[in-house]
Image (cartoon, rainbow, N blue to C red):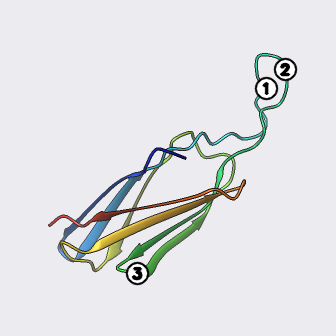
Amino acid sequence: MANPMRIRAAVKDGITEVRVLMNHEMETGQRRDAAGALVPAWFITEVTATLNGRKVMQTQWGPSIAKNPYFAFKVKGGAAGEKVSVTWVDNKGDTRTDEATIAG
């Protein structure tokens, strides 16, 4: 996928809030195209986040997540200037990793 994720991270009172907007079509495999043929399933199956290389969040997804999903979470720790990295993997084996610097 050519379009990067939009990641915003900010720390306040020792809690880092991470907000992610992912670019992905998220097809369920149940929709039909104009000719009546099923559109093949194509969706994110796993999302992982790291804070300075340490895994802080991992989740598994299925086909019911909306197109271009928005995802947010909070984690204890983190400081301004540190790096948050988010990686997704989809059911076709494609993967994308992007990172952001935590704002103060």
Q: Helix, strand, or loop for circle 2?
A: loop
Which callout, 3 or 1, points to the residue nearer the camera? Answer: 3
| Residue at 28% over, 80% down | 77
> Which one is earlier in the sequence, the residue at label 3 or at label 1?
1
Q: Amino acid at mark 2?
A: Gly
The residue wearing badge 1 is 32
Residue 83 placement, left or right of 23: left
Which residue is identified by label 3? Answer: 53
Q: Secondary structure at mark 1?
A: loop
Q: Disc 3 to disc 1, how far (Cα)? A: 41 Å
Residue located 46% across and 44% down the image = 3
The answer to which image quadrant residue 74 occupies is: bottom left
Disc 3 marks a residue whose amino acid type is Gly
* Residue ID at (51%, 41%): 68
Q: Residues within 10 Å of mark 3 (few under 14, many from 20)?
A: few
Give the mark nearest the N terminus, 2 or 3: 2
In the rendering, at what x and y percent does residue 70 appear? 45, 48
Q: Residues within 10 Å of mark 1 (few under 14, many from 20)?
A: few
Q: Which residue is mark 2?
A: 36
Picture coordinates of residue 1 (x, y %)? 55, 47
Query: Disc 1 residue type?
Result: Arg
Question: Disc 2 or disc 3, which is closer to the eye?
Answer: 3
